[in-house]
Image (tube, helix red, strand yellow):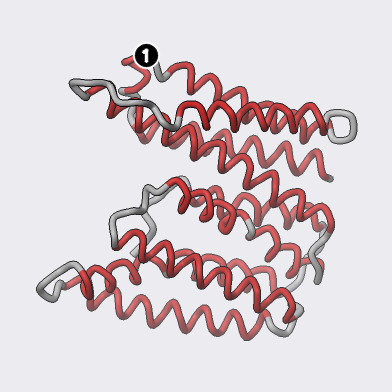
Amino acid sequence: MWPREHGAWPMLLAPFLSALLLARAWHWSVPVALVAVLAAFVLREPLVTLGRQRWVWRDERPESAKARRWLAAELALLAAAGGALALRWPLSFLLPLGFLGAGMTLLAAWMTVRNRQRSATLQLASAAGLTSTCLAASLSAAGRVEPWCWLLWALSAAHAAAGIFVVHARLEARVAARAPRPEPLRFRRPAYAMQLLLLAGAAALYPSLPAVSAALALSALVHLATLRSLSSPAALETPLTRVGLRAMTLSLVYSALLVYGLW
């Protein structure tokens, strides 16, 4: 009952750990916040299984019983963590973040049940939600959302969004390469446009935050190189595992540069 989208893990954990380092503080609620974040994230899988059992599958399947047990355990863990965080977080943040997380989880589960989990709009919204874990780390470690945390969230979400457009462009190019008649590539232009936005952000931030500027430039240049390689049949046949490892490595380096630049 673990999420299969491996690319979501860096979006979830890198901003949390980055914010924790930047906060330069520790509190007992930090691991509680991490437990809440993970519980909310993995909650989607049993919801998807039970949704398919309710609306897609005709007969009762063995995994549905397992999904009910996981759902009960994860909801109990999430409730306990939420109760503990109420002692640390202001309700003005706890309630909106809780409702946002619940709404995004239910929406993602519903879209997956309907086999629309590859919707670019859903993935972009999920990226914004997953990268918001930096807010949870700041609230727990420092007791408030530090000013730099909003910038960290925006920068993390921008990198994630740029990667999502590239992934869609890659999938689209693979399908087009195998089709008898090449179809229009809808995601190629938005993917290039997103990288140009990152480069514009890098230029704007260079005078005040050169390391952050370097992070944006690195993200854009790596993604641009990937987009250019999509015209090569050999590049399109690169195993998805290797592609995922490259993306994860880029995310780690990007996060390290953000921490260094915002320190």
Which residue is pictured at 52% across the width and 78% down the height?
Answer: 78
Please provide percent x and percent y for residue 5: 40, 50
The correct choice, above or below, for 43 with respect to 16 in the image is below
Could you classify mark 1 by the number of other residues whose Cα lies within 10 Å: few (under 14), some (14-19), or many (20 or more)? few
- Image quarter hosting the C terminus: top right
Q: Is residue 45 left or right of residue 122?
A: left
The correct choice, above or below, for 61 with respect to 175 in the image is below
Quadrant position of residue 47: bottom left
Which residue is pictured at 33% across the width and 65% down the height?
Answer: 1
Tag 1's secondary structure? loop
The correct choice, above or below, for 163 with respect to 176 in the image is below
Which residue ends up furthest to the right in the rendered image? 208
Q: Nearer the viewer, residue 173 or 71?
A: 173
Quadrant position of residue 35: bottom right
Please provide percent x and percent y for residue 181: 22, 21
The correct choice, above or below, for 34 with respect to 21 in the image is below
Q: Give the residue type at disc 1.
A: Ser
Which residue ends up furthest to the left in the rendered image? 59
Q: Is residue 137 left or right of residue 72?
A: right
Q: Is residue 200 left or right of residue 75?
A: right
Q: Which residue is mark 1?
A: 232
Please provide percent x and percent y for residue 16: 65, 56
Task: Say how many tags the image has.
Answer: 1
